Image: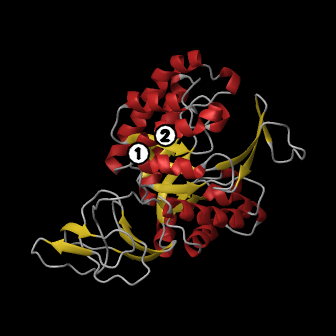
Amino acid sequence: MGNGSLVGSLLCTPPGIRSVYGGASQLCIRRGGSAYLRRTIFVPVRRVIVPHGEVQRATGIGFNGKPVAVKTTWRFTCHGRPEMKIGASTYSLRKAMDEGTLDFWGVFDWLADNGAEHIEIVPLADLGLVVTPDLADAMAAKARQVGLDISCYTFGASFIDKTQDEYATELERVLGEIDNAARMGTKLVRHDVASRPAEKATDEQFEQDLPLLVEACGRVADYAVKHGITTMVENHGFHVQGGSRLVRICEEVARDNFRLLVDTGNFFPVELDNTLNAIAQCAPFAAMVHVKDHHIRTSPPEAPADWRDRGRGVFTRVAVAGEGDIGIDEAIRSLSAAGYDGYLSLEYEGPQEARSANQKGFDNLRSVLQQL
């Protein structure tokens, strides 16, 4: 369970309930891998009692000393194991949209029907998905209708190699996207800040670019404060992809509402065997997590289709989350150990049928969470 302050109680939970958990805005009762009850309550309580093992009874004690029965929704803080919320990005189901088996609004429905707790919005301009204020409002309404959180708004940006006017234009665009995120109702935004080809993403170049990266991230974060939004950069684009560089940026931006989006699969091209260490290094700074997995080979594959040559004799192919070689279970344990209790967002971009791959990813993630 995450830390918070509980405001209600559940008396005599049904048999077979595996855990009682919660986060900043709700409490869920989980039976097996599915949410059994999600409620919101309003009366503060001092504590919640949950015995070890199978939960038989959970009671909130009100300030008047009497048990408080659950009525509608939970705001709370209790103590114990962090519980993460499983969902996916619109990008993770892009293949289904490309093939016409889902449209954009159908992604919301499919996720809700298949046990997801959130959706991450990634604009796909080549599919005609360009976010406007009206579209942001419509997304918020659709998410409410199907019972999903909009976990994060994720979009591209770059602040390097620009004239002053170009920099100002890009900053203005990104701040406008922060306004769109607020209309969606999300409290998390991931924007890129810079990318360079691998051969140009040297340590020397990073040091030269760092002051500009820090300034840009700080200005975006400062603007986002008025919306209560936390902004993030991700391990993405080679130049800002290694663990030490990400932590360096986060520490130098030094804003309470600036954190990291940790992508479990994106470290590998630059960190290789150090990938799990990089995830653990960045875990304390994580406000959002992409779950991505790869099959990894150290010899050329016999059938090279869908495999990427990463150099240094390493080849990768996108895998269903939990079925590749990154070590998703260990990555999530590292995040949990660092106190992470936020969103896990599948980002599948491989050759399998997208709905099937995402459903298997959900099942694998639920299995990992049950073992924590």
State the residue at coordinates (41%, 41%). Answer: 284
Vertically, is 197 above or below 185?
Answer: above
**Mark 1 highlights which residue?**
338
Tell me if 122 is positioned left or right of 22 in this view: right
Position in image of residue 335 (x %, y %) = 46, 48
The Cα–Cα distance between marks 1 and 2, rounded to whole angstroms, is 8 Å
- Number of marks in the rendered image: 2
Which sits in the foreground, 151 or 303? Answer: 303
Vertically, is 164 above or below 79?
Answer: above
**Mark 2 highlights which residue?**
280
State the residue at coordinates (68%, 55%). Answer: 323
Which sits in the foreground, 26 or 225? Answer: 26
Q: Residues within 10 Å of mark 1 (few under 14, many from 20)?
A: some
The furthest residue to the front:
53
Tell me if 189 is positioned left or right of 65 in this view: right
Q: How is the image coloured?
A: secondary structure
Inspect the image, locate mark 1, and give the three-letter code of the amino acid beneath it: Ala
Inspect the image, locate mark 2, and give the three-letter code of the amino acid beneath it: Ala
Q: Callout 1: helix, strand or loop?
A: loop
The furthest residue to the right:
302
Q: Residues within 10 Å of mark 2 (few under 14, many from 20)?
A: many
